[in-house]
Amino acid sequence: MAQYMVVHSLKVPADQFSQAMEDDSITEFAKAMQAGETPAKCVKSWNPLPYGNTDTFICLWEANNEEDIVATLGEMIEMITCEPMEVDEIDWAQIAAS
């Protein structure tokens, strides 16, 4: 699987997005991704919303292709944009240790 960074822009107000992320279904969504039951897996997310940046949400995804990320998001794509950028991970600790 390849890694993709996505800076998702919000299509809805930040409070609406935050409320949706607190829904009980998010736990089931996370479990399904962890179990490999979705086409792609969101590995980590960084949430700047509580700190004043109310228009973006940042995620690291693992997927075979960009379309799998969109498919995994399902109805959430109505709330956020999705323009994946394939990336390589640089492990700075590993570089420093070499």
Image (tube, grey):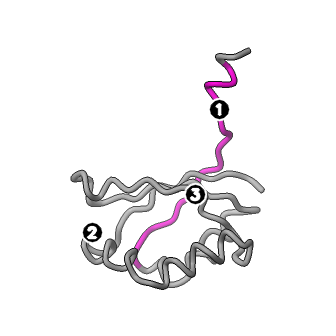
Which residue is located at x 57 percent, y 73 percent? 30
Q: According to the image, label 1 marks what residue?
A: 90
| Figure check: 72 above or below 92 | below
SS at badge 2: helix
Residue highlighted by disc 2: 14
The three-letter amino acid code for the residue at tag 1 is Ile
Image-based side of 21 in relation to 14, left or right: right
- Which amino acid type corresponds to the residue marked 3 in the rendered image? Pro
Task: Describe the element under mark 1 as helix, strand or loop.
Answer: loop
- Label 2 with label 3: CB-CB less than 8 Å: no
Q: Which amino acid lies under the numbered mark 2 shown in the image of this protein?
A: Ala
Residue 57: say if magenta.
Answer: no
Label 1 crowd bin: few (<14), some (14–19), many (20+), radius 10 Å: few
Q: In which quarter of the image is residue 84?
A: bottom right
Q: Furthest residue to the left? A: 52
Earlier along the polypeptide chain: callout 1 or callout 2? 2
In this rendered view, identify the residue nearer to me: 77 or 91: 91
Q: Nearer the viewer, mark 2 or mark 3?
A: 2
> Which residue corresponds to mark 3?
84
Give the answer, above or below, for where 90 lies relative to 49: above
Q: Is mark 3 on a helix, strand or loop?
A: loop
- Callout 3: few (<14), some (14-19), or many (20+) C-alpha neighbours within 10 Å? many
